[in-house]
Amino acid sequence: MAASKGKVSTMTYGRQRAAKGIISDREIRFKCFFQNTILDVLRSRVGWQEVQGDGDWDFYWCDREWLHANYDTMFLQEHQKILHFRNHYELTRKNLMVKNLKRFRKQTDKEFGKLEAQSWDFFPSTFELPSEYHIFVEEFKRNPGMIWIMKPAAKSQGKGIFLFRKLKDITDWKKGEYQPLPDPNIPKDIPETYVVQRYIDDPYLIGGRKFDMRIYVLVISFNPLKVWLYRGGFARFSNTRFSLDSLEDTYIHLTNVAVQKTSPDYDPEKGCKWSAQQLRKYLVARHGIDTVRQMFTAIDNIIIKSLQSVQKIIINDKHCFEMYGYDILLDSSLKPWLIEINASPSLTASGQEDYELKFGLLHDVLNVLDLENRLTGKEKRIGGWDLLWDDGPVFIDAMEQDAGLPSILTPNSFLGCDNQRKSQLRETYALAEAFKNSS
Ligand SMILES: Nc1ncnc2c1ncn2[C@@H]1O[C@H](COP(=O)(O)OP(=O)(O)O)[C@@H](O)[C@H]1O
Ligand SMILES: [Mg+2]
């Protein structure tokens, strides 16, 4: 760790750092709810120590339930960092995400007109059930032959999802779901909230199979909005060739690994994933660099706009951060569609390559959060994370332009590009050290 030079102060260095909320001359104490890659990462971190029981902590990778139960009664001290913002579900529950997006699109339409509002058309038409059932039926009737997908608002891993074409399928479902319980002594269950969404029936196919992308996004502040985008990530393929003949076949239509790995012909050695790098290379080879850049810029737009839609709603807290897993589906014209945003993307590895991706990703999350105070705060790249938004768009440095990138206004966005995270980190730390020593 670098000792700060320069300014003369009456406070000791340790006290200055403590006053700034920086942990100084002791180990960083962490807690972790999960027993997977994140625990391995935290345990492997030099200078970090696991806290048992109710001991005091500096860093907590908690689960959402714990946060909900404790946040309101908890006083977070200056040095403490915790996963999740208080009301993260505004973006990560399927119904609330769409509600926030629709509200923002309407507002944009009012203030800036239809053309600008079009840049919000990145989520398929969606309705909340049961509350918007009647508006859905009108929309259904306006679009004969369209395929719809029904999803429980708060479940994950493909649970409870089904596709349908006829209104009859859903009236049957509706009856089954909301029938009052026969026993008057048993309290009436509150009906589970669902979303019904236009099914993207022309997904981009590779080898005849559908896939969607898992993209990692780190938000360290909502006000001002500060967003990092990870270079790595992956595409999750379905095991069976795409077809619209059998809508009930989840192995064709749902790309969740949790679904695909139960398929009889799933090969655990091969898995069902491509890295983001593999996918980008494939698409560039087929469609050329400009088309692919446009497609990735459209993904940046989805990320930023979705976060902006809740920027004023999320309870901002400097102790909190969020690592989102975005699900994005490409259609046959390479248009990206936002499917959902996860607050707890799976950190359990499905194989060695997946483990390495997640291990590096999580180490780099901790590097960005910088509890060790190794950085200057001016970095645009830390390991595999690139700073995408810092209260406004972030552009690449002139230096990188020399490497052949086009205009001065090129976004600092490198999803699917090479990720030499370790050598880049060494460089970042050396620069930060030199900067601190000179200031
Ligand atoms: N509107 C849609 N069009 C096409 N495929 C979809 C759509 N919505 C979901 N899917 C497929 O179903 C999978 C699961 O849906 P998702 O909304 O991510 O729910 P879950 O929380 O269960 O993962 C997605 O990964 C995708 O493969
Ligand atoms: Mg999902």
Image (cartoon, rainbow, N blue to C red):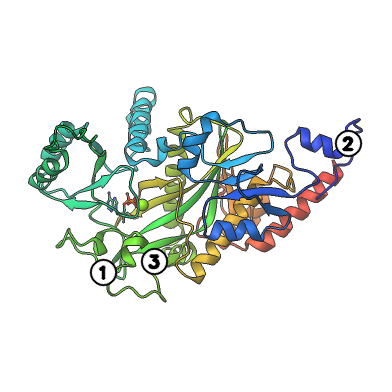
Give coordinates of residue 397: x percent, y percent.
Answer: 65, 48
Q: Quadrant of residue 226?
A: top right
Q: Quadrant of residue 249?
A: bottom left
Nearer the observer: mark 1 or 3; the answer is 1
Instruction: Look at label 2 and name its amino acid.
Output: Thr
Relative to 139, say whether 407 is above or below: below
Give coordinates of residue 325: x percent, y percent.
Answer: 45, 50
In the rendered picture of this protein, how many numbered marks are placed on residues? 3
- Give the alpha-carbon distance from disc 2 to disc 3, as whole Å: 60 Å
The residue at which mark 1 appears reads as 240
Name the residue nearer the viewer: 33 or 260.
33
Instruction: Look at label 3 and name its amino acid.
Output: Arg
Instruction: Look at label 1 and name its amino acid.
Output: Thr
Q: Secondary structure at mark 2?
A: loop
Q: Secondary structure at mark 1?
A: loop
User: Looking at the figure, which quarter contains the C terminus?
Assistant: top right
Q: Residue at x 13, y 44 (%)?
A: 176
**Position of residue 62 in the picture relative to residue 379 (left or right):** left
Give coordinates of residue 398: x percent, y percent.
Answer: 66, 49
Give coordinates of residue 30: x percent, y percent.
Answer: 64, 49
Q: Secondary structure at mark 3?
A: helix
- Badge 2 crowding class, 10 Å Cα cut-off, few under 14, some 14 to 19, many 20 or more, is few
The residue at which mark 2 appears reads as 12
Q: Earlier in the sequence, mark 2 or mark 3?
A: 2
The residue at which mark 3 appears reads as 286
